[in-house]
Image (cartoon, rainbow, N blue to C red):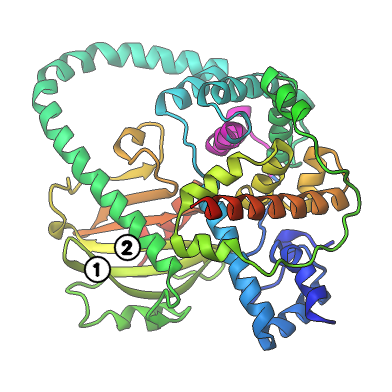
Amino acid sequence: MACESWKAKLDTDLDGELPEEEMRTFDAHVRGCVSCAADALTRIQMKRAIQVAGKRFAPSAEFRKRMQQSIASKPQRSFRLAWILAAASVVLVAAALTTTYMATRSGRDQVSRNRVFSEIADLHVATLASAAPVDVVSTDRHTVKPWFQGRIPFAFNLPELQNTQFSLVGGRMAYLDQTPGAHLIYDVRKHHISVFVFQERALPSWPSSWSAKLPGADENSLAPKNLPFNMETWNQGGLRYFVIGDASSADIDGLAKLLKAAP
Amino acid sequence: MASGNKTPARWFNLVCVSEDIVPSGSFEQLAMPHFERLYNFACWLTQDRLEAEDLVQETYAKALKGFSSFQPGTNFRAWIYKILRNTFLTSRTGLKATATVPLDPEGEDEDLPTVSETPESILLQRSDGQVLQQAMEQLPVAYREVLLLCEVEEMSYQEIAAMLAIPIGTVMSRLSRARRALRDGLRLRLQKG
């Protein structure tokens, strides 16, 4: 088939909507045709740019809360309301005492966290945009983990991924506040997820017990307003983990659980 | 037509993933995971955050009311997006948007040849996401929605066809026209500097 005929079907192919047989033939053609390969790559980049540009608007935490309340099932709502009322009187007293102290401190912490979230998001995006996103390419954790020996001043565990939907793509070095750390890339149903591991003590103004899922109903105010990714962070064994990607929050959470349970 | 999520591993590793068949659960459990994306889609349709909030709110109210008609095990995402879209189309903004922007006649579109110029590559070189967003905003709503459903929501052609109540061939031709219109819009903006 001539190139022009293929190019007319290029978008359909990139949408994954060509019949399998035709896709295979097309793949073989693209591997050997510079013109079609260049055209395809431009369109892939365009698709990615639209995906990023298209995830532009995020609802406010207040609106989310309002919606959640409006659709919550009635028994659940009344139980929650009763619980809130009972707890509120106790919390109110404690809150009044600590508000003044915490306001100053949390404001400072929030700025610091926002900056870290932004940097993590930047690292994730910059890596995916790179022609060589990983320095060690392997789906085997026993290959990827040893690669970091001598490169970072700590060790960490990686989970077994058999019978899960996740696959390891590879790893590379990452730096945050001039501190070296590990950057691992996983795939889940064509989405790329970055996992960053840094030493907790190397991150300034970061409460060691703090963990969060972003964007989330409670923690939304801690995240940069336009963070277009789902992210989860926690501390484990003196290491700070960040899991970030445009996959669903359930996928991010699933990978985080696997990492937390890694032997 | 191959379904997006049945696609084998490819050289470009970027295909449509559209599996959203869910088992059963309460309305809240099924609906809230789609909240952020529905709001984003509503913003793109209405181009106004307050209107988008109203639209999402009305969508959830309608969906909750009609939840008994939803069949567990079927595609909840397509169901609730369809409600949102229909609600938008009957709103004042929706009626205005669809009434004032004529589309080319649709049907089985001819295979469109690739243009030799690539505003995409110029845009990507400049890394100017704002220009792209502006070009997307300027698309007629019928093009904007099909592009968002395919690229951002990663729906298969089949899902989009079911949601928009149009044949798959029309989805393809509309997508093709949307992409061409976006390229033209980008080219125009880049020429203006």
**A110 w.r.t. A196: above or below:** above
Q: Nearer the viewer, residue A258 or B50?
A: B50
Q: Secondary structure at mark 2?
A: strand
Q: Is residue A48 visible?
A: yes
Majority secondary structure of magenta residues: helix
Q: Chain of mark 1?
A: A
Which residue position holds label 2? A196
Q: Amino acid type of disc 2?
A: Phe
**Which residues are drawn in magenta?**
B22-43
x then y, percent, for residue A192: 49, 63
Asked whether B191 or B51 is in front, the reply is: B191
Is B151 above or below relative to B47? Answer: below
Would residue B23 be seen by someone viewing this image from the given angle? no
Q: Amino acid at mark 1?
A: Gly
Quarter where residue A196 is shown: bottom left
Q: Position of residue A261 (x, y in %)?
A: 37, 60
Q: Secondary structure at mark 1?
A: strand
Determine which of the numbered discs, if any, sits on residue A181 in the image.
1
- Relative to the observer, which residue lies in front, B145 or B189? B189
> In the image, is A89 to the left or to the right of B160?
left
Q: Is residue A30 above or below residue A72?
A: below
Quadrant including the N terminus of chain A: bottom right
Q: Mark 2 or mark 1: which comes first in sequence?
A: 1
Residue at 10% from the left image edge and 18% from the top image edge: A97
Disc count in the image? 2
The residue at 16%/55% (across/down) is: A203
Left or right of A195, for residue B76: right
Q: Residue furthest front?
A: B192
Q: Specify the farthest residue to the bottom.
A: A32
Q: Is residue B9 left or right of residue A243?
A: right
Q: Chain of mark 2?
A: A
Cα separation, mark 2 vs mark 1, equals 7 Å
